[in-house]
Amino acid sequence: MTAGAADATTVYDVAIVGAGIVGCAVARGLSGLEVDGRPLSVALLEARGDIGDATSKANTAILHTGFDATPGTLESRLVRRGYELLSAYAVPAGIPVERIGAVLVAWDDEQVAALPKLAAKAAANGYERGELIDADEVYARLPHLGPGALAGLVIPDESIICSWTSALAFATEAVQRGTDLLLRHELSDVLVGGATTRLVTGAGTVEARWVVNAAGLGADRVDRLLGHDRFTVVPRRGELIVFDKLARALVDHIVLPVPTARGKGVLVSPTIYGNVMLGPTSENIEDRTDTSTTGSGFEFLLGRGRTLMPELLEEEVTASYAGLRAATEHDDYVVDVDVAQRYLLLGGIRSTGLTASMAIAEHVVELIAAQGITTTPRDGLPPVPRMPNIGEAFPRPYADADAIAADADYGRVVCFCERVTRGEVRDALASTIPPSDVDGLRRRTRALMGRCQGFFCGAEVTRLLDDGLRARDDAATGGAS
């Protein structure tokens, strides 16, 4: 099943709480295994109505080399390994990735002095391709950068990626491998028994032998339901401004600040969708659902933009948004196994979780194996599902003459800003994990995300969505009203 109610008669081998990028990757990894000669049974629980609908949907969408992680940490190891795994997986899965490289720019003498230390830190993390450059070379690579840059450090393998498509690919493959995706299953209680654990949700009770906590912003609350008090998640809001596609000519590298203990700071980066992004801010808040943007946030970002790339501020703004990161009091991922409870915690997975996701899933398999649970890879798995391309660096249906010749709906544009076709909307609604609302359709097609923000196409796209949802409901009920 993909979104139905929990089946009270099923006892799963593993139940994963949270269908963000990490939970989806773990579900994909575990559902590719067998135990005792049968497929490992997996349930993926999500409180919301779609996968990747919380922290994961507002990631800065950078595929990190891990050059600036703290050497020796679990995060450092998993980000480095995750970069390799996700880079390779993106090819067959159709996840758009552009390896455009990054330049860390030093604006004062203290930052200049920090650059060799950052290069040495990168080498300690296994990344030795960093290159120190002088101001002339900085401006040769970034001619539209603001005045005053003194030096830089080039990280040529930093990349931009589509975080939405990554999560959808993981979840789709997990479901096709047999995972039960249980949407709108908000956890309210955990009852640990002798051999199984019961997860009580608003949509029913799910029973499993093992539980994996990948609940992101809610991971500490799930942890406390199991009797622990090991960390506290502090929502860290990051606001971003997205500039029009016409700004893309200004920058073809990720422009990074010299990082501080507070975070990576404000960056300027192209996006996989052809825009340019400025941000994020970094503000600790209390409300774990508050993704509102603020006047003070915009003022701060525009001030930084005037220094970093003043020409960027002359371009039109297409959108703004805010995401929440799961900051904790720890400097590393909080990963632990409680053997007695048959419980595995994946907490404090910050924005690097996108890059590390597949390595985290690999690590989960290792941790479970260390408890004496012998698993082996399954034979006869379905092929890696190919995701529809929503990136600008690769061909899309509206420009594919062969696709249009085979199916005229790929030539019928319904969202002109983002050049989304009727065929893409139809395919999203017929996919393994279809959208259930406009936001879900946005993340699968980019419809309504352009400069008009749905003013021109909103009525038609919404009608197509409603018709598709109605047809799906009729098919599920045999046409009964």
Image: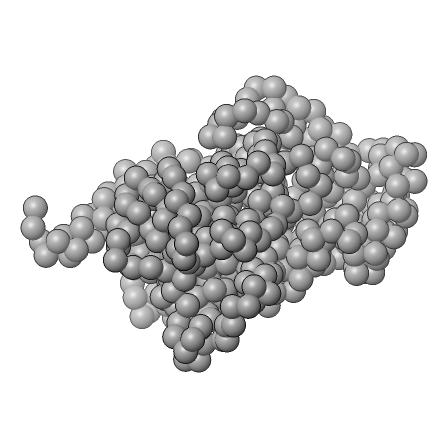
Q: Residue at x 42, y 35 (%)?
A: 452
The quarter of the displayed image where residue 295 is located = top right
Q: Is residue 399 left or right of residue 61?
A: left
184, 316: nearer the viewer: 184
Report x, y in % for residue 191: 39, 44
Question: x%, y% of residue 357?
Answer: 57, 55
Spot occupied by residue 185 in the image (x, y as percentages of width and height) = 34, 44
Q: Quadrant of the N terminus?
A: bottom left
Q: Residue drawn 71% across and 28% down? A: 304
Q: Is residue 313 above or below residue 404?
A: above
**Which image quadrant is residue 59 in?**
top right
- From the top left corner, tell me how far across and down residue 111 is, in percent: 87, 37
Q: Residue furthest bottom?
A: 379
Residue 450 in view in this figure: no
The answer to which image quadrant residue 80 occupies is bottom right
Pick whichever, 399 or 224, lies toward us.
224
Question: Which residue shows up at 49% across the image and 51% down it?
Answer: 341
Please say whether residue 201 is visible from this viewpoint: yes
Q: Is residue 362 left or right of residue 113?
A: left
Front-most of residues 239 and 378: 378
Question: In the displayed structure, does residue 350 sit left or right of residue 476?
Answer: right
